Structures are given as C-alpha cells and as structure tokens.
Amino acid sequence: MTAPVRIGSYRIERLLGAGSFATVWLGHDPVLDSRVAVKVLAENWSHDLRVRERFLDEARLLRRLDHERLVRVHAVGELPDGRPYAVLAWADGGSLRDRLTTGPLPVTSAVDLLGEIAAGVAVLHRHGVVHRDLTPGNILFRSTPTGERVLVADLGLAKALAAASGLTARAGTPGYMAPEQDDPLAVVDTRADVFGLGRLGVTLLCAPAGRPGAPLRPRPGVPPAVTAVLRRATAPRPADRYPDAAAFRAALWAAATPSGRNGAAARRPDGPASGLGESVATEYGSEDAAVTGRFRRDGAALWRAESDGGAPTGPGTGVPAGRRSGRRRAGLLGAGVLALVALGGAAGDAATPPRPGAATAGSGPVTVALPAGWRAAGTGWAGQYGDDGDLEPALVVSPDPARWAVDPSVPGAFVGLSASIARRTGAEGFLAERPHADCVAAPVRRTRQGGVDWVVAGYACPRGRPVIVEAAGTTPAGLLYAQVVPPPGGGSAFVDALLAAVRVRPPG
C-alpha cells in the first residue's frame, strides 16, 4: 500500500491502521496546525453501495451526536476516484487492544475503565442508537488538558433502535457479539451492547476461558459482586441482562464499592438471574440441550468416519475440544474469511480431488493445483497487509468462486499466506481464534501434505454447511491457512489431497 501524500487539504504522515473496510491515516491539518485521523473507504469496497452508505452513515451519526465520549468527526470528503473519507479527531493514546498486549490492567483501573466505556455507550443509548461491535480495538484514548479521555469509536455497524430488527445482517466480532446478533430475524437492542460491555469486562477482569460459555474465572482482587454483574451482562437471553448501558454502569459502580459487594447490584428487579453459563440446558433450554447431544454424537461420528485419525484436544493443543450448538444460525464460516477476496464466477464438477498435472492457480508465492472443474479467483487477503503495505496473498478455489461465500451447497476453499500472522501466533493458536460456536468440533489431527505439517480441525454443523475444515501450517514464508468445505462424500481424503496441492515458493 502506497501512502498518499495528501488527502484533501490534509498532509498524510503515516498509516495508523487498516481493516477490511477502511484504512486510517495520520494527517496534519495546516489551518489548525493539528493532527487528525483520516479514514478512507477501502478500494476493494468502493463499488459496493451498501458498504459505502454505511461508511457515510457512521460519519453522519458521529457528527450528529458530537459528544466528548465519542470520536468526533471534523469533515467528510471524496477522493478523485470517488471513495469517501472522514476526518476524525486523532486518538493519540491508541486503543485498548494495544494496551492489553503488554498485560492485564490493575483491577481497580480496569473497573474504572469499564465504567468509562459504559458511560460512552450510554450516550449512544440515550440517542436511540445501538453500537453492535464493542471490542478492545474500538475503545480509544485521547489526551486532553485535563487528562486522558476514553472514546468509543467505529460506529460502522451502529443502527437506530427503530431499524435494529428484521432481516438484519449478521454483524459483530466473535467473542464480543451477543447471541441474538447471529440471528437475522432477532431484535437487536441496547441489551446487545450490554453483552458487549460484559465481554469487555471479562477480558479486563477475568482469566481467559477455555471455551465459550465457560464459567468466569475472575482475577485475584475482583470483588465477587463485580463478577456477578459480568455474569448477568453476558447472559445468553437478552431478558436476563441489564436493560442498557446506564443500568450496567450503575450496577458495576455499586458492585465495586464496599457497600455493593454483597451481590445485590447484580440481581434483577424480580430476583437473581439464574443459570448463567452453567449448562446447555439452563442456557438454551432442554430442547436445545437434546440437539446438542445429538450433534455431539452424530456430528463427531460423521467426521471421525471421514477422518484418518485424531489427535488429542484440550490443553496444549491450542484448539478447544468441542463447541455447543444452539438456536442461532450455524455453519457461518469463521472470521469473515469468505468475504475477504474479490471473486469471479465459474462452474464445474466438484467431486474429483486434484490430480498430478492438474491446472494450477496462484496468488503471489502460493499456488494450488485445482480439482477437476474448479476455478480460482482472488486478489489478496483483505485486511492482512505485508511489510510492503500490499495485501498478503490469498485466493478462493471452487466450482463457483462467486457463489461459494454465500451458498452453503457450493464446496470450495480459501487459501491464504500471512507472514504477519506467523509473527503473532502459530498454527494451533491461529485455528483457536476461528471457532464455529454452533458446530461440534472433532478431534484435531495432524497431517503432512505438500511438505507442510498441517494442523486440521473439522466441524460438523447442524445447519448450513454440514462440514467445515480449518487447517493451518507454518512455512518459511509465513503461516499457510486453508478453510475447506469439501464436496459431498469428499471426506478427509479430499481435504488432504487439496492440502497436498498447495505449494508455497520459498522466500528470497
């Protein structure tokens, strides 16, 4: 990615960050002699009118609210190529995600910070807006003459409450997203943000959980009443949570003070919230518990029948041993990977694995021998940038690459290579970041294919794509990742043949 010299009247100094939908640059305002953040819609989304409108809606919303607890918008403009940009106040203190990389905050500071974040979200709720994507990366810090200010940022997914239900697209960040945000027909209101606040609190005040829904393990020094507040805030059912951010903040404040540590602040007006995170039956009801049991038996058996062996899961493997099924949509592919490449169309027979002499396709140093009838498309791994500023290599292979991301009946695979991810984590750690919460995980297995030692995790899903396979391995050029939806009857033989067909040209 080449840094622009100017955007509008602002001189660009350096890149601050990049995501799937936008890049943010540090700019200098010559009139006010101050630094600003200039957020520009990503080039690969410039043709999408829906994404473009969402980008502008965020700027309009922040401008309308214009509050000291939210990132402020100074201006909007348009590049010569038609892409919109927004000029924002620069958060010179970075993000909460940045700060957590150095270790946990002291308990008292973490509780105070969570209260400040809740106060910012309460501003949105007072104006009838739900944020829908509260994560450490969206909490920023800005220096002021009176001290540091906590800011709530990235309202790209925010919606007015009147429009937050009815065919709403799945939106949010796994791990912080409320369960109802995974259901396109569900009502998404202020209680979804309460769940996000609770998950932020868990990140700040609890030890990492081994699996979704596991009992909270508060850090030493966290008052039990504060833990109870987090349990209620992260209740699976919206009705069991606090009604909005202001109520959450009041309960947190009461629980963190000596007089509030008897747990009263964590109780509902009509009694305590019950059954939080204790079992599938109490979280989802007996009917869903039965569904979970059936998929644990049948789904895992299906994968084992297709698999050529398993390896232990749990501590030391980096990949959880199982996932719960629930009433929410299942089979959604992890971390939005499927939507991150620019696709073209094709068609063909999906049943034959790649054979020697098959046609190949490539992206950068990555090449894939194609199964019969499959085609390839892709311009890079959107949101993943190399040291040169360009997208890291990735491609989709499928009988129909244009439909694979949206049609569960179409098999295919996403294959990407990332040097930046390899510096951050290994194959096991990367796969652990890609849970399929409504699917049942089979035992993790390891296989050597194409000169790469792959870690392979399979998931059997109750709806949508019946089987999803996540695979990763390390190479001298970076972490190699493949997400595979095999054709009917393909099984592990097909998966292994496809992994063996992936090649990476050595660096240098």
Image (cartoon, rainbow, N blue to C red):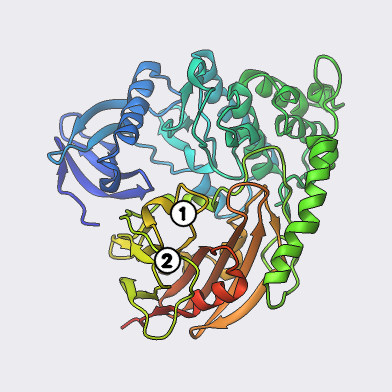
Indicate whether 159 appears above or below 80: above
Circles 1 and 2, Cβ within 8 Å, touching? The answer is yes
Q: State the residue position of label 2.
A: 416
Q: Quadrant of residue 59?
A: top left
User: Is there any visible trace of residue 277 in the rendered image?
Assistant: no
In the rendered view, does 83 fall on the left or right side of 226?
left
Indicate whether 311 appears above or below 440: below
The residue located at (40%, 73%) in the rendering is 370
Compare residues 242 and 250 and report the one nearer the observer.
242
Q: Earlier in the sequence, mark 1 or mark 2?
A: 1
Query: Residue 83: x, y in percent?
Result: 21, 38
The residue located at (76%, 47%) in the rendering is 219
Is disc 1 surrounded by few (<14), some (14 to 19) or many (20+) residues within 10 Å? some
Q: State the residue position of label 1.
A: 337
Alpha carbon separation for disc pair 1 and 2: 10 Å
Q: Quadrant of residue 433?
A: bottom right
In the rendered view, does 39 fall on the left or right side of 437?
left
User: Is there any visible trace of residue 490 in the rendered image?
Assistant: yes
In the rendered view, does 325 fall on the left or right side of 412?
right
Element marked by disc 1: helix
Query: Residue 391: x, y in percent?
Result: 32, 60
Q: Amino acid at mark 2?
A: Gly
Element marked by disc 2: strand
The residue located at (69%, 65%) in the rendering is 303
Compare residues 294 and 114 and report the one nearer the observer.
294
Q: Amino acid at mark 1?
A: Val
